[in-house]
Image: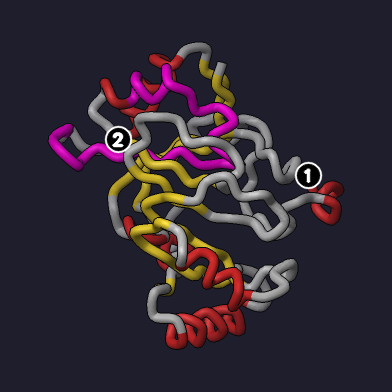
Amino acid sequence: MYTVKELFSTLQGEGAQVGRAAVFCRFSGCNLWSGREEDRASAVCRFCDTDFVGTDGIGGGKFEAANELAEAITTMWQSNNRGMNQRYVVFTGGEPLLQLDQALIEAVHDQGFEIAIETNGTLPIPKGIDWVCLSPKANAELLVKQADEIKLVVPQAEHTSLEDLLYRFECMDFQHRFLQPMDGPNKEENIAFAVSVCQKRPLWRLSLQTHKWIGIR
């Protein structure tokens, strides 16, 4: 059984794959926050801006089998093309690795999709994932230390020394490193902060939530 908050076609708005056509499959549930506001203050991750509770989003629901969900993902894809590097699905959440398993990976690959995940890095990565985007949270123990990209949201109040943290991640195996300004009331200030850090540490690049700027999901 797979519990999906929402399933929709869009463009990837962040990171190294920005602008790429994609189907987003947002699983319900996370291991760092319940998703309920009354639990935010005591959660490991306190700044999440995503609704991942329940199944009431666009295309959401409960899917009994991997093939059923894979077919729903294919239905959302807006092109008939299934050639190399064309079909692309992003599993996200919440935390997608609470539900993404080998059966679903194989079923989606059988439909011709390249598979990406957006994970907090606290759970092991299963075999068969084509693109891993790691977004670590300050208070969570990091299990994943190698990925295609790291997308670090800044500033996080719990970061005691950002310089030490960046150096730690610079010593790990990431093909792409991004700083993403935290959304919210201090967004402009956070963008300026991220820009200044990228200028000082050029191994890092700026990632903006372009889907919010242009008004798509």
- Badge 2 density bin: few <14, some 14–19, many ≥20, Cα 10 Å: many
Residue 65 image position (x, y, % from top left): 47, 12
Residue 26 image position (x, y, % from top left): 52, 38
Image position of 118 (left or right of 141): left
Which amino acid type corresponds to the residue marked 2 in the rendered image? Trp
- Badge 1 density bin: few <14, some 14–19, many ≥20, Cα 10 Å: few
| Residue located beneath label 2 in the image | 77
Magenta segment boundaries in residue numbering = 82-108
- Image quarter in which the N terminus is found: top right
Residue 105 circle label: none
Q: Residue furthest front?
A: 171
| C-alpha gap between disc 1 and disc 2 | 31 Å
Q: Earlier in the sequence, mark 1 or mark 2?
A: 1
Q: Nearer the viewer, residue 100 or 122?
A: 122
Q: Nearer the viewer, mark 1 or mark 2?
A: 1
Image position of 134 (left or right of 54): left
The answer to whether 189 is drawn above or below residue 61 in the figure is: below
Q: Residue furthest top?
A: 64
- What is the secondary structure assignment of the residue under circle 2? loop
Q: What residue do we see at 50% from left, 87% from top? A: 196
Check residue 99 for magenta coloring: yes
Residue 36 circle label: 1
User: Which of the 4 quarters of the picture holds residue 86?
Assistant: top left
Residues at marks 1 and 2 touching, judged by CB atoms closer than 8 Å:
no
Q: What residue do we see at 66% from left, 39% from top? A: 30
The answer to whether 185 is drawn above or below residue 122 in the figure is: below
Check residue 16 for magenta coloring: no
Which amino acid type corresponds to the residue marked 1 in the rendered image? Arg
Image position of 15 (left or right of 123): left
